[in-house]
Amino acid sequence: MRASAYLALVALAAASLLPAGSATAQDSYKIGVTAAMTGPAAATQAPVIEMLRIYVDRLNAKGGINGHQVDLLIEDDQAEPSKAAANATKLVRQEGVILLINSSFSSTYGPVIAEAKRGNVPLWFAGAVCPKETHPPKADPLLFCSTGFDFSVDIPVAVKAIKDMAKEPAKLALVGIPVPISRIGIDGAEKLAASLGMQAVDKEFVPPATADYTPFATKIKGADANWGFAYAPWPAEAKTFEALRRLGWTGQYLAYGHIQAEDELTRIADGGFEIFMANSLFQDDLPVHKQIRDAAAAGKYSFPPTYGTEGWLSGRILEQILTKTGWPASAEKVTASMSSLNLDTQGIRGGPLVWTADNHFRTKQSYRFYRYDPDKKSIVRMRDWLTVDVTD
Amino acid sequence: MSPQLIANIVVLAAIYALVSAGYVLVYRVSHVLNLAHGELMMIGAYILVATAGLFSGNPILALLLAAVSGLVMGLVVYAVLMRWLTGEAVLAAVLVTIALGILLRGLSILIWTTQQFYPAAIFGWRNPPVHILPGVQISVASLAIVALTIIVYAALFLFLQFTAWGVRMRAAGQNPLLAEQRGIRLHAVYALAWGLSTFTASLAGMLLSLDSGVESTMATIGLKAFPAALVGGLDSLFGALVGALIVAAAEIAAIQFVNPLLSDVVPFLVLLLVLAVRPWGLFGSREQLDRV
Amino acid sequence: MTNVPQAAPLLAIDDLRVAYHRVAVALHGVTLRVMPQTIVALVGNNGAGKTTALRAISGFIGVDDARVIGGSIRFAGRRIENEPPHANTARGIVLVPERDKVFPNLTVAENLTVAATRRASSAERRRLDELVFALFPALAPLRARLAGLLSGGERQMLAFGSAIVCKPELLLVDELSLGLAPVVVDDLARRVRAIRRELGITVLLVEQNVGVALAIADYGYVIESGHVVLEGPAGELRGRPEIQQFYLGLATGNQVRRYRALRERPANGPGDRRQ
Ligand SMILES: Nc1ncnc2c1ncn2[C@@H]1O[C@H](COP(=O)(O)OP(=O)(O)OP(=O)(O)O)[C@@H](O)[C@H]1O
Ligand SMILES: [Mg+2]
């Protein structure tokens, strides 16, 4: 066979592996998703969207919403702005979706927001960083966000918590990754720590796909830090900690608990590694956790069931939005429905999720703190819901 | 420079060197730049995840099986794909490796999703620190990487230098026509080069995954090791070793003394610097360059 | 070394046509026979197609982009057109190429090791190596030297040596004398005869130096622009005036460059005894 023919064949095979939009039904709720199903952001985003899909499949199996099926069109953007833009254009203009969901790196937001505004379609960030435009009191009419973490709220909570937990004066090492959100968060943490009388002795930005985290850990240890604080995607948070321990570092470490956290805490099994997070863990053993576990098993979820909490919550939000939208549906009616959301989170969060006309984010945020207890050989809750006001 | 820093350099250099060996083997024999090398390394790590799941009670068997699969993987890639490109322009072959990389990335996400896997945890292995000198600690897995890199390079050197098939591999790289005329089946030599290349890549992937797990972006490490192979001159194993040391030292010095944000770009800065002065790399042969 | 009966040719080429890049035809129907344990010379001008003929026998690889497009090549009765070189080497057809005849970055010893000899035990491999150093004693002290550093004569001896390690039945030699001093050529010529005599190896020899070729060969073919234009026992060819005139440089003042042109104008030129 000629090289060019072979090349074409291989490219074709590669292209066919990428997920394609499902068939569209005439009288269904059409929801468009552009998400990092593969690529560098997929570890955090794909589990959310897959659980959302499982939730929607279950809804449809039970007859849909208001007697109509929910058609979830999932497009992969590989965390690339150009692909996200193309996805959004296709979903809004060709598919005519009544709601757009974005779950990817924040670098993809610009073009997706632009497309949503052109088409006057509401845009919901689920499981990914919340843009400031969703925050109260001046939320953009079309932009919404349900994601558990948000650096502007998380960072002060974390730094104050370290101040409280530290038995001796904290010498703090800060760990992030070189992307804007993480950097702004870590720089903010440095300032706040100083204002609270803590010394930030080192600050590391670890690039993704680092072959060996030891060089960064060596620097932190060399700076004589006794506390570490990480605000980054989970692999960077956890691997830096593990590298520190391998160097014989004995300090304590606080990190945001992303969706992988529950499985990972058990694997790492280190009492000095604490996490804080907006979602409760399966360890809390609420009825909703059993529901998620069953849905994950029945829907053949590709990830451990504990990864599914955020996606499950997104599914419940979508269900309430569409129920209130009624039929026939339109983008305007969905936007209106979203602007008066009041969802009982069933213990996944520390309170109800409320969206109003000027708040598309939340006005109160609650956190739980956990760590692994080597004596009990299980995860223990260190602090129950700590609620803070979201003030900008 | 503290002893711990030197230990860090050695570990990172060992990782880059172990990955680079495969670039050099395939390039030296067939002048094809295998841009799917990082992905093949990642697949090697995932295969360990699979064999570890099957034989969690028998780590040695799982490791052996994964290593052998790494060898077979290269033979299959050659037989199914690259074989049909011998005699075509080198560029066509390189483009096919790019397509192969995309294919493997897609395939790995279909099979293993984007989740992080830890084969060491499946075996119930901890990865404790080892004191190699007072004040110098590295993890057991890192120590294993360094040891394995030394063994692999020594074995490859002995193989290429002193065995008939090793000499044949070198000969095929220099003059494929004359090699054929001396009775050497080029397809066999190329398949061997691919097999050894993915074998060493798989070893690297396996050990990296034992150290810090594997997930869908591991392939990027292949890209970071690439400057090491190029700095040394793509056709020289010794060059790859030295290149890996230089790149690792530069990267760690940048993290330690300049700015950790530089760690991603430093390998490529070193590469640009070296190529500006010696376009054929530190130990590569000038003549090889003309052919590309 | 061969079991082929005396009457049957070891190599029989009939109406061989070869094209480069699918279109450029370099051989237009060459027919020749090589009898076992003889030395046959193929002579002709630059670009006549001698190398192409030897390469067609030894086999092309992909990058050559060349093919046998017609006719047949039979070796010991078996057809071998368009077989890969390694397969032909395994059959016993081994080429000493015109250029790039050794691996320059390998040592002399490695250039011998490299050959993938058919059906040879390690003891036999050692014997073959020794045989090479016995045939070409000048190579013995150079074992550890890189082949790229050898002189032209040493390089040619090494090329012969590495071919002999392949256990040839038919040795194809492309340009024995190219770039070598007359003394060296004489010496090599003697060794070629020794190889045939002592090892029973059949030789097909391409040469531009017709004098040298016809001095060693038993039989000769003259090739022009991809056609065989003349053939005969070497002694007889040596005596032909047109050979003397155009290849041995014994005549002067003639404007006709090619033998074929001469043949097409039979009355032209002194001493043309062609019937
Ligand atoms: N790779 C090639 N591609 C195209 N044409 C070729 C190729 N090799 C040889 N030729 C052409 O084929 C013809 C025969 O060439 P060949 O090398 O066989 O001649 P030769 O008799 O060996 O000449 P010389 O005595 O100079 O070595 C020439 O016209 C040459 O230009
Ligand atoms: Mg020639």
Image: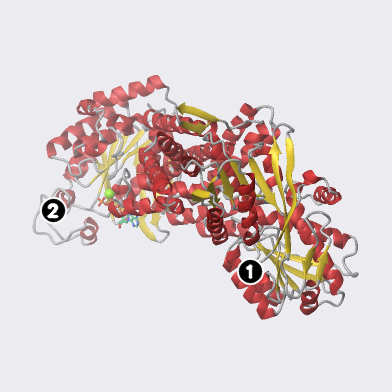
Based on the displayed image, in which of its 4 quarters is residue C238 positioned? top left
Indicate whether A163 appears above or below B143. below
Q: Chain of mark 2?
A: C
Q: CA distance from mark 2 to mark 1?
A: 104 Å
Question: Horizontal and vertical percent for residue C147?
Answer: 26, 36
Q: Is residue A118 above or below residue B36?
A: below
User: A104 or C110, which is in the foreground?
Assistant: A104
Q: Decide if residue C89 is on the left or right side of residue B79.
A: left
A346 vs A392, nearest the viewer: A392
Question: Where residue C271 is drawn, which disc sits there?
Answer: 2
Q: What SS does tag 1 mark? A: helix
Looking at the rendered structure, the kind of residue marked 2 is: Gly
Depth check: A215 or A273 in front? A273
Q: Residue furthest left?
A: C252
Quadrant into which the N terminus of chain C falls: top left
Q: Chain of mark 1?
A: A
Q: Position of residue B78 (x, y in %)?
A: 53, 44
Question: Whereabouts is ligand 1, in terms of quadrant?
Answer: bottom left
Residue drawn at 43 percent across, 31 percent down = B150
Name the amino acid type tagged 1. Answer: Lys
Residue assigned mark 1: A132
Give the label on residue B278, or none: none
Q: Is residue B75 visible?
A: no
The mark lying in front, picked from 2 and 1, is: 1
Q: In the picture shown, does residue B271 fall above or below A378? A: below
- Could you tell whether C52 is left or right of B103 in the image? left
Judged from the image, the secondary structure of the residue bearing numbered disc 2 is: loop
Whether labels 2 and 1 share one chain: no
The answer to whether mark 2 and mark 1 are in CB contact below 8 A is: no
Q: Quadrant of residue B45?
A: top right
Q: Position of residue A233 (x, y in %)?
A: 61, 52
User: In this figure, what is the number of numbered marks?
Assistant: 2
